[in-house]
Image (spheres, grey):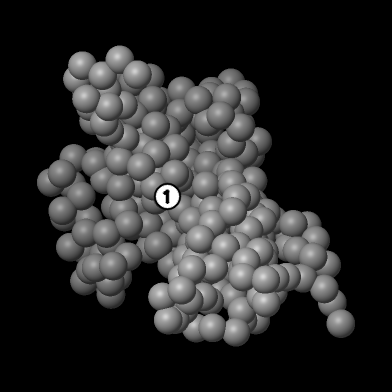
Amino acid sequence: MTSVYEQVADFIEEETPSAVVTILRPEEMLGRRVLSVRGALQGSLGDAGLDEAALEQARRLIREGQSKAVTLQDASGGEVEAFVDVYPAPATLYVFGGVHVAIPLTRFAKILGFRVSVIDPRGVFATRERFAEVDELAIEHPDDYLQRARFNENSAVVVLTHEPRYDEPILKSALDTTAGYVGAIGSRATNRARVERLRAQGVSDEKLARIHSPIGLDIGSQAPEEIALAIIAEIVASRYGKAGTSLREKAGAFAVA
């Protein structure tokens, strides 16, 4: 019988995010473990409440890329200590649209350790002169690229095309996956119109709520480099479940420690 960690080795090779949840306490449950992969548990810890809590923590920590000890609650409300060992896929940024903002955005992403792909059917924009540092430069129609793309919890999808005929199919495809971040450039009015069209195409409100648009944190950005900074900051904040609030505000205006 294949062990949990043999399965994990296969998932690592496939770049499929996974996590192993192992019970530490109470002693009578010590060593029970379960594998979380593709948003579901493979097996059970023997308690429905524990399974639900383990899955929630595994999803969160896969997204954050952290292995750590956690406290879970079983179905009766009792506390159980466990360790979540995560094996995330590489953080990957998919940029659809080789516009000017994409140039600094891809540079920032590479500094942060992302694997970066730029997709644009227009060869005049998708050039190595403009995107020397990216891992993949795909000069092809988004629909063709999406047929082979694999998104997961550590995938960030940024749509910069400015054209509904391109951005809406991209968003529909991305929202059907577990991609950790999905954002699209455009004003509030543009996003409202886009959402209405996607809703008319059958996209649920739950999925539509995942779209970050207008894209980026509100830092007053104007220049392309500033807009790119706002986008990558929002991607990082989303990865860790944060809103991008000022640390000074969180600490208090006059806090010194």
Quadrant of the image occupied by residue 249: top left
Q: Nearer the viewer, residue 145 or 121?
A: 145
Q: Residue at x 26, y 45 (%)?
A: 213
Q: Position of residue 70 (x, y in %)?
A: 54, 57
Q: Nearer the viewer, residue 58 or 196?
A: 58
Quadrant of the image occupied by residue 136: top right
Looking at the rendered structure, the secondary structure element under dot 1 is: strand
Label 1 packing within 10 angstroms: few (<14), some (14-19), many (20+): many
Q: Position of residue 12 (x, y in %)?
A: 74, 57
Quadrant of the image occupied by residue 233: top left
Q: Position of residue 115 (x, y in %)?
A: 62, 38
Residue type indicated by callout 1: Tyr
Residue 145 placement, left or right of 187: right
Q: Residue furthest left?
A: 189
Q: Residue furthest right?
A: 1
Residue 93 placement, left or right of 24: left
Q: Nearer the viewer, residue 213 or 5?
A: 5
Q: Residue at x 56, y 29 (%)?
A: 112
